[in-house]
Image (cartoon, rainbow, N blue to C red):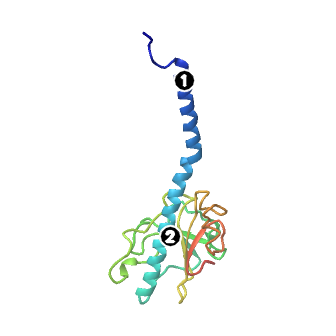
Amino acid sequence: MQKKGFTLIELLVVVAILAILSVVVILTLNPAQLLAQARDSQRLSDMSTINSSIALYLQDVESPSVGAANVCYGSAPTTPNSAGCGGRMSASDPTVTTSTSPASTTGAGWIPINFATINGGSPLGSEPMDPVNSATYFYSYATNASSNYQYEVNANMESTKYSASGTSDVESADGGTNVNIFEMGTNLGL
């Protein structure tokens, strides 16, 4: 009677093949890039929500207060205090300000707009903040504060897919003045 089973060498070959396949799958999928893409998708959604909320505010409120000109409002407490909010805004926006209550929708948040004055209440539960919210990845807002109430909101994309020259490049394709920042609003030259 002959015993059936696998030899040690056959088992080692199978384990080696599985290890090689695992490494190939991990290198192909690149989990760090997938996480960065997920954060970028959140950024794009947040920018759209902010843009829609500001547009609704400007349309609904009779005498809107949109913040000061020559100021870059940032979502992160470590927003770079260089000209134009770390180079995001034009050189005419030298001042950077942050909020102690960045998620507030009553004008005390990082966007200096009281969304609660919109008829029917604020469209935002809280002001969106960047998923990382650091000195590199943060949201910014600027306005000309004139009678035509032009504004710009910005975000920096993290993944190679959504960054400038990526396969789904949103930074250089948005029509704004900075090809390395995603810009949205009524005046992309602020």
- First in sequence: mark 2 vs mark 1: 1
Q: Is residue 8 above or below residue 136?
A: above
Please state which amino acid type lies under the numbered disc 1.
Leu
- Quarter of the C terminus within the rendering: bottom right
Task: Give the residue drawn at x 55%, y 87%.
Answer: 146
Whether pointer 2 and pointer 1 mark residues with C-beta atoms closer than 8 Å, the reply is no
* Residue placed under numbered mark 1 in the picture: 12
How many tags in the picture?
A: 2
Estimate how packed mark 1 is, as few (under 14), some (14 to 19) or many (20 or more) residues with alpha carbons within 10 Å: few
Under circle 1, the secondary element is helix
Q: Is residue 152 above or below residue 82?
A: below
Q: Position of residue 158 (x, y in %)?
A: 58, 58
Q: Position of residue 168 (x, y in %)?
A: 60, 63
Q: Does residue 178 appear left or right of residue 34 in this picture?
A: right
Query: Relative to the observer, which residue lies in front, 141 or 30?
Result: 30
Q: Is residue 7 above or below residue 174?
A: above
Quadrant assignment, res 174: bottom right
- Quarter of the N terminus within the rendering: top left
Task: Give the Cα distance between marks 2 and 1.
Answer: 52 Å
Q: Position of residue 173 (x, y in %)?
A: 63, 71
Can residue 76 be seen here? The reply is: no
* Residue placed under numbered mark 2 in the picture: 47
Task: Give the residue drawn at x 46%, y 78%.
Answer: 54
Please state which amino acid type lies under the numbered disc 2.
Met
